[in-house]
Amino acid sequence: KSIGMVRSSLIVLTVLSFLCLLIFDQIIFHHFNSPPLGETTLSDRARRLGLLDVIYQHKRDIICQVKEVVYKYRSDDGEYIEKRSWSCRDEESPDVFYKLDAIPELFVEQYDEVLSYGNSWIRIRGANRGKWLFKRGTIYIPKSAEVELLSLEESRQKNDFLDFFIGTANETVDNFFHTKPVLVVRISAFFSYVSLSKEELSDSIFGEQQDSVNLRSIFEDCSNGKVRMRPARGPFIDNGVINLPIFIPILFMPVDLVEIVAQIILRLRIGPLLPRFRHVMFCFPESVEDGFIAYAYKFTHMSFYNNKWCSYPSAQVHEIGHNYGLGHSGHGNRYGDTTGMMGYSYPRTSYPRKCFNAPKSWGLRWYKDKTKIYVPLLQKEAFTAKLVSVDGYKNATEGEHIMIIKVILSGVLVPTPIFVMFNEQTGINSDTDLFPNQLTIVRALTSKPTKSNLICGVSVGESTRIRIGVRFLVVEFCSYNTTDSPTYANINMFLEGSSSDPLLSCLERIE
């Protein structure tokens, strides 16, 4: 009985001590590091007490590789809310990601597209690296600090170093193939735990028992076997899942704070094994920060989920898509393109069966033998094609069928290309719920096909006109061949305004 009382007392003291440290940490930080984030003017009293060195290492030059992080929340009325932030890792500790606090908005605006690719390095002169307790995971950028982008050659050399040190600097297009060991981290804390067991998580992600639609099945089917997600193996790991107690009360604690603790404890437990895993999925208890759904680091191996969202295939594939550098697919809003997995996610297991939209599919390079580039300003005759869907790709004949068409609009006031694909609602794409069995026309929002916006869908027997400067590109869905295998869409494209317009239109020929 006395041993039990001593044990209970120790647990209570541990919890109270932790809470006191956390409260003290917040008081010290907010009292001495105000005014607002980015302004690190400390009071004379703080300097006199030496608290400057306790809280962080002051005015250091830091060189690090920048990564974009996209957090997703759901408001009380069900609306999706996105919070974008930046993190970085340096050569001293390349497996640790630091949050970048108060990165200058003008700098991000100027280099936004370059930074979003995940392989750029920056130099911060006069940065403050957090030292004390949970501030260790943050780099503060005062307004007086200077931030500059390193040259392409300097970034390339540092990326080569990371390739040598930890296997890969980024999840680049060259790594969109082969077998991917995936580690699922099931986190538990004081009075908080993930509601799904290790067996249920393994089944929902790898289909180890009866779940037929999961992370592994979707990537394997959509890539036509080019990507195979397999459960990680190692000590403490069962069918790809490891239990990770973090021994702290996390009720409504900010998710990025829990992330730092979880990463530290995971490295202490299986540190030497981490470089073997191409993806690490952290499953948090539901009591973490209210409204949080999921987020991921672009071009890295890490993604994070709130409780049951770890078991929903649409969230799994969406966040791993961010690991590959894919951005969101918009249509009306940032997540509105639900033809593929980079739009809205669904709180459902074993659903949906669908892949990625045209720009993402082009960027993943799984179908590069069935793609075509069309430059309408240089090609006077009509462009015709037999367009197969992602489900028909496996039976397509090279030289006869095409899956994705990239339309280059260079030389006009439209800097980014558009992509055309047949969104057939069948097989591995049977749950696409926007413009089913139509041609989808999607514009890439960056020079690399990461972020995109769905323009429209075109039904069989119909056409659409897309403005190119002062002229229009006409896209026609001539007919839908359902008798052959694979089934395909007969399509026709031409630039309106040429002397032979009537002869170019397949719809006029049909009439």
Image: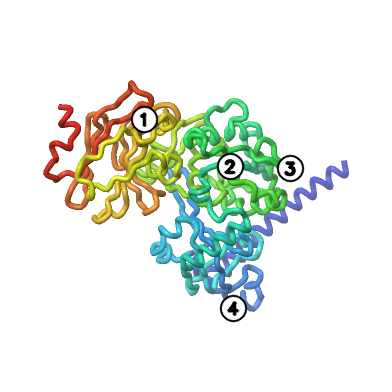
Q: Which residue is mark 4?
A: 44
Between the C-alphas of marks 1 and 2, the distance is 28 Å
For the residue pair 209 and 476, the one nearer the viewer reads as 476
Residue 32: % across, % down: 58, 70
Q: Which residue is mark 2?
A: 180
* Label 3, residues with CA under 10 Å away: few <14, some 14-19, many ≥20: few
Q: Label 4's element?
A: helix
Inspect the image, locate mark 1, and give the three-letter code of the amino acid beneath it.
Glu
Inspect the image, locate mark 4, and give the three-letter code of the amino acid beneath it.
Asp
Mark 1 and mark 2 lie on one chain; the one further toward the N terminus is 2
Q: State whether residue 83 is above or below residue 148.
A: above
Q: Label 1's element?
A: loop
Q: Which residue is depicted at the point 66% across and 48% down?
A: 249
Image quadrant assignment for residue 57: bottom right
Inspect the image, locate mark 2, and give the three-letter code of the amino acid beneath it.
Lys
- Single out the mark in the foreground, 4 or 3: 3
Question: Would residue 374 be found to the left or right of residue 34 on screen?
Answer: left
Between the C-alphas of marks 2 and 4, the distance is 53 Å
Q: State whether residue 241 is above or below residue 63.
A: above
Image quadrant assignment for residue 441: top left
Mark 3 and mark 1 lie on one chain; the one further toward the N terminus is 3
Question: Would residue 4 be found to the left or right of residue 418 on screen?
Answer: right
Residue 171: % across, % down: 53, 50
Residue 130: % across, % down: 61, 65
Between the C-alphas of marks 4 and 1, the distance is 67 Å
- Single out the mark in the foreground, 3 or 1: 1
Q: Which residue is mark 3?
A: 235
Q: State whether residue 205 is above or below residue 163.
A: above
